[in-house]
Image (cartoon, rainbow, N blue to C red):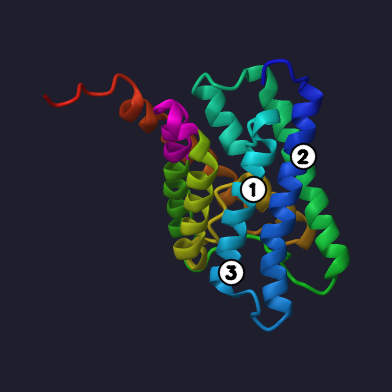
Amino acid sequence: MPGITLSRRCLAELVGTFTLVFAGTGAVVVNDTHGGAVTHVGVALTFGLVVTALIYALGPVSGSHMNPAVTLSLAFAGVQPWRDVLPYMLAQVAGAFLASGLLAAAFPRHGTLGATLPGGAWPVSWGFEFVLTAILLVVVRGCSTGPANTLPLIGVAVGCTIGLEAMFAGPVCGASMNPARSLAPAVVSGHVEFLAVYLTAPFAGAIAGVGLSRLLFTNPPEASP
């Protein structure tokens, strides 16, 4: 962001990703440890609502990516400087690990800490994660490159997309769409057996989403007479 130092932007990414992982995976953990009090719908809404809030709170500082796949794909799109990609990713991963570490201290007996795990065959989960992340990037780029009056709605649009995708796809693949969100709870809890799915599919899906966005939003068709 113009006029904002890289260190401040990275701090915003760390705080944002910490909050996302703490609230989102925390909702999973609380649901598991308190008799399903949050519910699956509640978990999905938690992810969607926290992303919405963070986009408006931290977006003016760093763009509020909170997701290495988003950061990398926006660099491919020419929106994010390549020199910022690694610092952003490191900040995001650090924030995610801080959140998972705090949850592990609070709930030491929980087995997964909200790690994303396939609900069936892992290739199905890989495919779902690819498609879900591609859709997310189309929404992000559509709101960013569309008419100026759509930009203030980007937080609502992205938050709704994440909540919706988590609601219907969570039982299938966990609906991570975010390598940092998956990496930290998997490593801290020791459930790394399917981590490759969630470290590859979101990156591939995000880049595919940017490519599709170029076809959709570059040189829009002329209005019908």
**What kind of residue is marked 3?**
Gly
Residue, disc 2 = 14
As drawn, is 109 to the left or to the right of 124?
right
Identified at 81% across, 25% down, the residue is 7
Which residues lie in the magenta part? 137-151
Location of residue 6 with respect to 203 vertically, above or below: above
Q: Is residue 193 magenta?
A: no
Q: CA distance from mark 2 to mark 1?
A: 15 Å
The residue that mark 1 highlights is 53
Q: Is residue 188 left or right of residue 154?
A: right
Q: Which residue is mark 3?
A: 42
Residue 157 in view in this figure: yes
How far across and down, in percent of the image, does residue 79 sit? 54, 21
Q: Is the C terminus in the top left, top right, bottom left or bottom right quadrant?
A: top left
Question: Which residue appears at 62% of the width and 18% of the height?
Answer: 81
Where is residue 186? Give x, y as percent: 71, 57
